């Protein structure tokens, strides 16, 4: 059973967040949490919070199973570009330089390695 969590309009560039997403893509939840907790990059705190939200979403879908037994891992994570806020900064000789404040959207999908059994005893 998959669980999805989304984080929208994060005020960081997509390039910086993709570096963090590449670190944890395909890893187990425990390893990903430890990696994000001790990473010094700016977006790792927000990504850690998103991962905890995805775990909570998975728990809500699978109330009868335990996290420890399910072997959760990050099946998919992708970072898309969001809104770009445009500002002007004064430049010499009466000119203006455009400043682009970028944002992004993060989508994380968790899945478990151990598939749950159906009522008839067959594996899913």
Image (cartoon, rainbow, N blue to C red):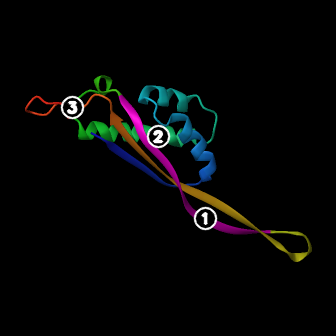
- Return the x and y of residue 28 as percentages of the image width and height: 43, 29
Magenta-drawn stretch, dominant element (helix, strand or loop): strand
Q: Nearer the viewer, mark 1 or mark 2?
A: 1
Q: Is residue 119 left or right of residue 72?
A: left
Residue where numbered disc 3 is placed: 116
The disc placed on residue 84 is 1
Q: What element carries label 2?
A: helix
Residue where numbered disc 2 is placed: 49
Q: Is mark 1 on a helix, strand or loop?
A: strand
Q: Nearer the viewer, mark 1 or mark 3?
A: 3
Q: Distance between the residues labelled 3 and 2?
A: 27 Å
Q: Distance between the residues labelled 1 and 2?
A: 23 Å
- Return the x and y of residue 103 as percentages of the image width and height: 58, 57
- Return the x and y of residue 98 as percentages of the image width and height: 75, 68
Report the span colored magenta: 72-89
Marks 3 & 2, CB-CB < 8 Å contact: no
């Amino acid at each position: 059973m998959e669980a999805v969590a989304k984080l929208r309009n994060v005020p960081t560039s997509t390039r910086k967040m993709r570096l963090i997403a590449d670190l944890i893509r395909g890893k187990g939840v425990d390893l990903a949490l430890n990696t994000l907790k001790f990473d010094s990059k700016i977006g790792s705190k927000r990504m850690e919070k998103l991962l905890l939200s995805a775990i909570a979403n998975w728990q809500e879908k699978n109330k009868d199973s335990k996290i420890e037994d399910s072997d959760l891992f990050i099946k998919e994570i992708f970072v898309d570009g969001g809104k770009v806020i445009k500002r002007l900064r004064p430049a010499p000789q009466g000119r203006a330089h455009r400043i682009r404040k970028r944002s992004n959207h993060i989508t994380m999908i968790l899945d478990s390695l151990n598939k749950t059994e159906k009522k008839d005893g067959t594996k899913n």
